[in-house]
Amino acid sequence: MSRKPACPPSSSLPGQVVLVLQGGGALGAYQIGVYQALHEAGIEPDWVIGTSIGAINGAIIAGNPPEARLDKLREFWHRMERNSFGFATMPRAIANAITLGQGIPAFFEPNLASWWNPEARVGIEHASFYQTTPLRSTLEALVDFNYINQKRMRFTVGAVNARNGAMRYFDSKREQLCVEHVMASGALPPAFPAVRIDGEPYWDGGIYSNTPIEAVLDDEPRRSSVIFSVEVWNPDGSEPQSVLDVLDKHKEIQYASRASNIEQQRKLHRLRHVIRQLTQHLPDKELALAEVRELASWGCGTDMHVVSLRAPRIGGEDHTKDIDFSASGIRARWQGGYDDTRRFLEQRPWEQPIDPIEGIAIHRLPEHC
């Protein structure tokens, strides 16, 4: 991972800094490049929200003091790389096949009983092709949950109830978090088993909302924010030409950020600003009425800058890229996240004014060539 001179520290970002980390397995190496560039620029998140691998990366960031975060992130990804298959020069397809067959010792291991008899009624905590017991040990070694629960940085993970399908955000602002919350957020079925919290089974939040930006925009009370939304799935607009291309595109679309969701959030935020503007035209006598105050409370004047970082594709990818823990794959994605974030830091789009009626601006880099 090459380094460049750090940008000058920034103390002028207009609002809290939020890091939103998508799920995507090995693609999550891109997120580490993003964090490294922010860290070198003197920008530390006030709030980290993650799903799946984003929850794991987020836990390492939130669960360590600033000076230790990059070292802990490097250690995690070193464990993923070194333990996956051990041969850096092995062809990616063979390496991915070995990962499917053997797992990653620091992350997951085959659950042979389910492979031999997938119809066995073993209970939801064992109904999976792999077990994630090794991940628990890895997280406990790299994440200080006491540090998280001291609320030095807000940390939120998304998981979906495997019994009723309800999405839930576990938030250090409101509750004590532990290793089970992070493991639940990464429990992607049918590969990984559900994790039980307070008696309820939870799966990977990515099957419901893989880019949980709504957790920021729906937060109460809302605060003006610069939101670094880190997206590791990239439906780039190309047409698939083969069955393998179709499998890849299907997964990209399934787990990518939904443009419709972002647009809905934009409209909701605009409506809040419209309500606020309307109340400013009411006479004091009307504003004093309890029912008017209640209606006016739906308005807000916060500004939201959404910095959309989307991982580039790298050569030779296919539908198994989310298990590509090869040294070259990790290095390429890490570098991509670092370079993209540096470009945004140079442009500083959050310094641009926002339409007072809209209240939200979405900033994107030109598509990668």
Image: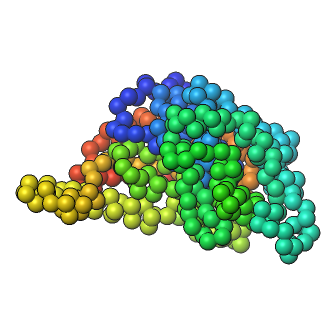
Asked whether, in this view, residue 241 is left or right of residue 267, the answer is right
Let me know if residue 205 appears in the view: yes
In this rendering, is residue 224 above or below 245?
A: above
Let me know if residue 314 appears in the view: no
In this rendering, is residue 81 above or below 44?
A: below
The residue located at (58%, 37%) in the rendering is: 148
The residue located at (76%, 66%) in the rendering is: 124
Q: In the rendering, at what x and y percent does residue 213 appear?
A: 47, 54
The image quarter containing residue 177 is top right
Query: Of 54 and 316, which appears nearest the observer?
Result: 54
Query: Of 178 and 229, which appears nearest the observer?
Result: 178
Q: In the rendering, at what x and y percent does residue 347 appear?
A: 39, 38
Q: In the rendering, at what x and y percent does residue 163 appear?
A: 66, 70
The residue located at (35%, 45%) in the rendering is: 223
The image quarter containing residue 14 is top left
Quarter placement of the N terminus: top right
Furthest residue to the bottom? 119
Q: In the rendering, at what x and y percent does residue 295 appear?
A: 23, 63
Asked whether, in this view, residue 173 is left or right of residue 86, the answer is left
Colour mode of the rendering: rainbow
